[in-house]
Amino acid sequence: MLVLAFHFGHVLPPPGNVVFALGWVGVDLFFVLSGYLITRILWATRESPDYFVNFYGRRILRIIPLAFALLAAYFWLALPIAHHFGYDLDRDGSDQLWYWAYLANWHNGRHGSLTHLWSLSIEEQFYLIWPSVIFAFSRKKLRRLCILLVVLPFGLRLILMGVLHLSAGIAGMTFCRTEALALGALVALSGEIPALPKLAIPSAIGVSLIAVAFGTEGRIMGIYGLTLVALTCAGLVYQVVNRAGNASLFSRSLRSAWLRRFGKYSYAIYVLHTPILSAAMHFYAKAPTALRGCALFVIGIACSYGAGWISWHFVESKILRLKHFFSYDRARTPSSQALAA
């Protein structure tokens, strides 16, 4: 929802576009959630004889079909049609292997409708490596590794962006963006981490100050802000995990039906929203008025939700029935809700 507001916020008139200028932090929140949930599942099932087969089988069924359908529709259908009518002639699709191989975050591509796939590329690279790491290391060594993976990306960005003054694509490189995933994994592997919620509020204040002083994107935010955002999101996830199931207003609000529906359709919404965004930007550019911008903001998000709903009910849910071939031993897993992810 944060990412939707950030992207479609570009068609809003001021100050609306400023309000959602930090919506990109939704990706980092997703990384923390993913690091937590995937690590929790992997640790609980690491003794299973089908540990690797089950994990990769379930991930492939969940991730690959929809993402590959988007790539096929773009490179094999939309782009040739655009070329036929004389549009986007500078985009010949010769770089599409980067996207099919989930390496988009290492590639400064020119395909605007696919730029959001950088985050899915990092996620898939995490899925590829992390099961073997969980399988091989003890809990103590894993916690130490997680701390290293929080410190390492900050150091790399400081050197590459602060000292060498490089900028293009640095913040999207996998080893420069591991702190959110690592913090989520650390929450899954640890009991009490009292420092985490204590760091969340000052980290959020720090991000806000950087945004006001230096902008919501750019070098300073890229060096320091990403670590502060990860700490903020990790503190939030830690609080949610520790309050799960209780009767507080905070917990009950996160169990609301409309949020759970967004959660169910969120993957498809994220994958499919950028073509809708491109259409919204096109219509807005024709007559950039405040009323049109507000209307396109609402319509764009509604259409993205609709695309996610259609994808889930007519495509994804059918494919996910095959997960029974890769079933976890539920006695060893933390919860059925976690496994559904």
Image: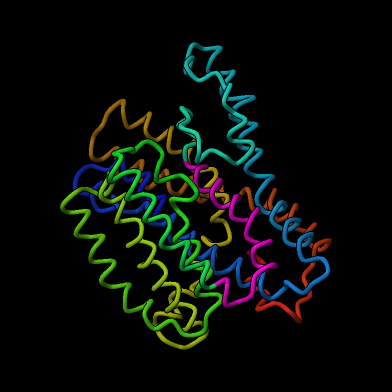
Of residue 277 and residue 197, the one placed in the foreground of this image is: 197
Which stretch appears magenta? 116-142
Above or below residue 305? Residue 183 is below
Q: Is residue 258 visible?
A: no
Residue 245 placement (x, y as % from top left): 52, 85
Q: Report the front residue among 199 and 242.
A: 199
Q: Residue furthest bottom?
A: 247
Tell me: 122 left or right of 129: left
Residue 40: image x %, image y %?
Answer: 61, 73
Q: Is residue 133 magenta?
A: yes
Residue 72, quarter of picture:
top right
At 36% across and 41% down in the image, what residue appears?
A: 296
User: Residue 49 in the image: x percent, y percent?
Assistant: 83, 69
* The C terminus lies in quadrant: bottom right
Residue 100: quarter of image: top right
Position in image of residue 97 (x %, y %): 62, 30
| Residue at 70% across, 48% down | 315
In the rendered view, would you say 150 is above or below 218? below
Q: Is residue 88 left or right of residue 335?
A: left
- Pick the quarter of the image with the N terminus: bottom left
Front one among 72 and 110: 110
Q: Which residue is at a point 63% across and 71% down the rendered structure image?
A: 338
